[in-house]
Amino acid sequence: MSQAVEGSIALVTGANRGIGRAIVDALIEGGAKKVYAAARSISSLDALTRQHGSVIVPVELDVTKTGQIAAAALSADDVTLVVNNAGIAVDAGADFADINLEAAREQLEVNAFGTLAVTQAFAPHLKRNGGGTLVNIVSVVGLGSFPTFVGYSASKAAMHSITQASRLALAAQGTRVIGVYPGPVDTDMAREIPMEKASASSVAEQILIAIEAGTEEVYPDPIAQQLGGLYSSDPKGVERAIAAMSAGAAVA
């Protein structure tokens, strides 16, 4: 089951920067009819609106606030494509003993429960509009945790589980669910990570290819492809590979 990007009507959360911004740009370049660009601060979307004009519909959306989700679902009821991209990384680089539990809970609220809440709100619209596609921007650390990214990894592991459940739950209504599992990406969120990073635009390009091909899982960069391949064939191997990366060794 595939979907054409051209003529689609999309909602992208966390659209003001990073991967979200790149996805919006790619969708419009690919011929999307309308993009609801959502972010917590609607003024942060001004640059997108100036760049792309009336094809952009700015939406104020904090994915932890049920009222804002309901309002967004009411105004964007014509969507055929929903991209759950909004996310935070609060404890990146913290030593295991110093992990802040409140920060871990905040990441679960945004990255996992926010994804679930947006999915629940927009699934009926996707069904009514022909099924459509749901894209969740997870992370390869949702498949195996770095010891210095415990809160973030846990939230992305929960998002991975939500993605799997959504795929099963929404199949009957004809909605394709795509999980995207990037490694380090050159965005503000990953600035301090001392690893080779993919560009946000290259990740967005791979996502659009997957939408049009009907691919269910996307590993858009070399690190993601390596760990994703291990996850499929040798799940314990992901842990060994991450241990090697954490130690600064080359991964076999």
Image (cartoon, helix red, strand yellow):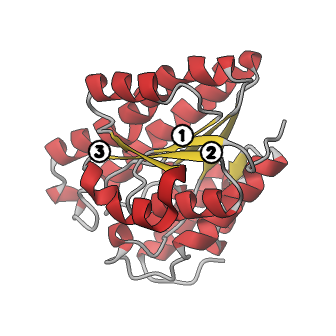
Q: Quadrant of the N terminus?
A: top right
Q: Find numbered disc 3 in the image and state the secondary structure of the residue it sits on.
A: helix
- Can see residue 230? no
Give the residue displayed 59% in from the left and 21% down from the top. Answer: 125
Residue at far front of view: 54
Q: Find numbered disc 1 in the image and state the secondary structure of the residue it sits on.
A: helix
The reply to whether dot 3 and dot 2 touch (C-beta < 8 Å) is no
In the rendered image, residue 97, in percent from the top left (x then y), is placed at 18, 57
Q: Amino acid at mark 2?
A: Gly
Q: Residues within 10 Å of mark 3 (few under 14, many from 20)?
A: many
Q: Give how far apart the Cα atoms at labels 3 and 1 are.
A: 14 Å
Vertical order, 106 against 146 (above or below): above
Residue that numbered label 2 is attached to: 179
Q: Give how far apart the Cα atoms at labels 2 and 1 are.
A: 7 Å
In the rendered image, residue 72, in percent from the top left (x then y), is placed at 39, 30
- Can see residue 133? yes
In front: 1, or 147?
1
Residue 100's label in the rendered image is: none
Q: Residues within 10 Å of mark 2 (few under 14, many from 20)?
A: many
Residue that numbered label 3 is attached to: 107
Q: Give how far apart the Cα atoms at labels 3 and 2 are.
A: 18 Å
Vertical order, 127 against 246 (above or below): above
Q: Amino acid at mark 3?
A: Gln
Vertical order, 57 against 64 (above or below): below
The reply to whether dot 2 and dot 1 touch (C-beta < 8 Å) is yes
Q: Which of pointers 2 and 1 lies earlier in the amino acid sequence? A: 1
Q: Which of pointers 3 and 1 lies earlier in the amino acid sequence? A: 3
Residue 160's label in the rendered image is: 1
Give left or right: position of 185 versus 221: left
